[in-house]
Amino acid sequence: MCTRVLWPDANGAVLVGRNMDYHRDLATNLWKLPRGIQRDDGVESKLRWSAKYGSVAVTALDLMTVDGMNEAGLAGHILWLAESDYGVYDSARPVLAQSVWLQYFLDNFATVADAVAWARSNQLQVFQLTDPSSGETPAIHLALDDASGDSAIVEYVAGELRIHHSRDYPVMTNSPPFEQQLELLAQVEGFGGSKPLPGSTLAADRFARAAYYVKRLAQPSTPVEAVAALFSVMRNVAQPFRLPDPGKPDASQTIWQTVADLTRRRLVFESTTRPNIVWVELAQLDFSEGSGESKLDLASGLAIENGLVGNVSDKFAATSGLRLLSLPMLQQLKAGR
């Protein structure tokens, strides 16, 4: 299970935090992706685009963008939602494979409002893909936020696209779907109900605690204090090392956390297994077209061996292009077995 928390009024700045909770290491790296990269939908290649904005992508297994921020201050976060039902695939409508769903928005939009308008007007579909390393098929939803403090929760339930777009929606966790989360929150003291603030690891309980504590953060006096304050909320809703719940790979320990300052374009990354907090200043990266992709290796152990800590904006290494998972790639892997 995961948690995303938006803090839209941190003394003039907008910050967002997320926890990645999973039952295994996702070999997560950070990628610098410049403007001009050519991509397609990862399904039938009918939807093609050239990246309008450069971004820093946080990946899972270097096969899927699960978190990140672009140079315009738009950020996104992929979380698990067991109730996800993407419906029957309709080849006449635009579609994005799960692996490129978030990356499409980072590549193409500066604001949540523009991203939501495009998704709604095109009745965007999402195509499920099987993780070739584990055989798992992710069930996911998406949160978007931007430097203005705007927020959207994008889900597919009962085969329908559901977008909850409001600055009043700073928190997202997991099951149940978002509208039911709001109903549960209304039962908690301080949000209209009489139930005490819950303390379990259930998604609805983490939702309530995150919503409660982010509203009670004191105004920070420095940008560093703002990051520390939001990390304190994320740690309150994090999960300790644990065995996953039976049949629920998402109901597991927190393996990493991020806090992004969308105003100052700063992305902070903290692993729970590698004691190095690193951050990236997007203003110090070259996102110009033709500048090439580069990677900050956090997965191989080099992060610790090379003493990576603090501002690592100059530590990205040029590497071959990020190849996000696609249906043709899965078909090739299957044919080769």
Image (spheres, rainbow, N blue to C red):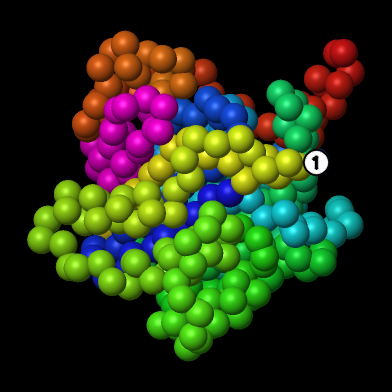
Q: Is residue 160 visible?
A: yes
Which is more toward the observer, 228 or 193? 193
Please name the residue shown 41% across and 27% down the image: 273
Which is more toward the observer, 200 or 297? 200
Side (left or right) of 129 relative to 58:
right
Residue tagged 1: 44
Amino acid type, mark 1: Glu
Report the quarter where the C terminus lies: top right
Residue range in magenta is 266-293
Q: Is residue 271 magenta?
A: yes
In terms of image quadrants, where is residue 214? bottom left
Q: Is residue 273 above or below residue 93?
A: above
Q: Is residue 322 magenta?
A: no
Count every numbered label the image shows and give the total.
1
Please name the residue shown 28% across and 33% down the image: 277
Q: Locate residue 274, reporting x and y percent.
A: 37, 25
Please name the residue shown 82% across and 66% down the image: 158
Numbered disc 1: secondary structure: loop
Please name the residue shown 53% across and 76% down the image: 185
In terms of image quadrants, where is residue 181? bottom right
Q: Locate residue 186, reporting x and y percent.
A: 53, 82
Q: Locate residue 56, reporting x and y percent.
A: 41, 39
Q: Is residue 48 visible?
A: no
Which is more toward the observer, 285 or 64? 64
